[in-house]
Image (tube, coloured by chain):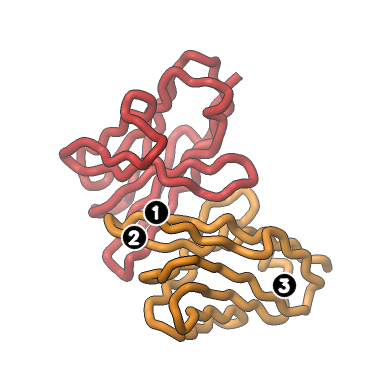
Amino acid sequence: GQQVMQIPQYQHVQEGEDFTTYCNSSTTLSNIQWYKQRPGGHPVFLIQLVKSGEVKKQKRLTFQFGEAKKNSSLHITATQTTDVGTYFCAEISSGNKLTFGGGTRVLVKP
Amino acid sequence: SAVISQKPSRDICQRGTSLTIQCQVDSQVTMMFWYRQQPGQSLTLIATANQGSEATYESGFVIDKFPISRPNLTFSTLTVSNMSPEDSSIYLCSAETSAPDTQYFGPGTRLTVL
């Protein structure tokens, strides 16, 4: 099935700085979802992108779907300690099954 | 939205035994799923729990090892059978609501097999 690759695997960010995590696929994605998992917690749905070139914002988080629908990005501005966790992208395929990327583990340095 | 609970939250088991994990959703949902997340890793789908019929398993997962029940639209169980240390992992259930293709996850069951 589809494989989505995420980079970087780890991200150490100074509090207040911005960072971006990327999700890439070798084939066209029908859609992309993003989840956040806090340490010791479970994944929480953030957003779904469906349209080519789509951009959605949630406060300091900006999600983008590539024009070719083969990649997506999550950009966080002015990182806060509450942003700590692992961010996963995932594609939802037939049967509504989720295929997750490897995740980007974010640590914030105060 | 949906609120999902799982029991037990964690367990330590001896190899060769079986553990049944329960997943309860606070509302009727069409789709329920079971995932495995090994420490520090991503989530891997085990199976789709189908109401009233046999579960649909992903490649690498079989019914004899991971029997699943879904007797109604709010409840499912996953059994990890004949456990070995390699089964040590977090097992999560999820449920999909109708808006918009959103999956809600339970808190997970942390299983350690000795």
Q: How would you rate the neighbour count of disc 3 (Cα within 10 Å): few for under 14, some for 14-19, many for 20 or more?
A: some
The residue that disc 1 covers is: A1
Of the two numbered discs 1 and 2 in the rendering, the one whose residue sits closer to the viewer:
1
Q: Chain of mark 2?
A: A
Name the residue type under label 2. Ser
Q: Chain of mark 3?
A: A
Q: Are marks 3 and 2 in contact (CB under 8 Å)?
A: no
Q: Is residue A19 above or below residue A97?
A: below
Identify the disc placed on residue A93: 2
Name the residue type under label 1. Gly
Q: Chain of mark 1?
A: A
Q: Earlier in the sequence, mark 3 or mark 1?
A: 1
Q: CA distance from mark 1 to mark 2?
A: 9 Å
Left or right of B12, for residue B3: left
Q: Are marks 1 and 2 in contact (CB under 8 Å)?
A: yes
Which residue is painted at 53% across and 52% down in the image? A42
Q: CA distance from mark 3 to mark 1?
A: 36 Å
Q: Residue furthest left?
A: B52
Q: Secondary structure at mark 3?
A: loop
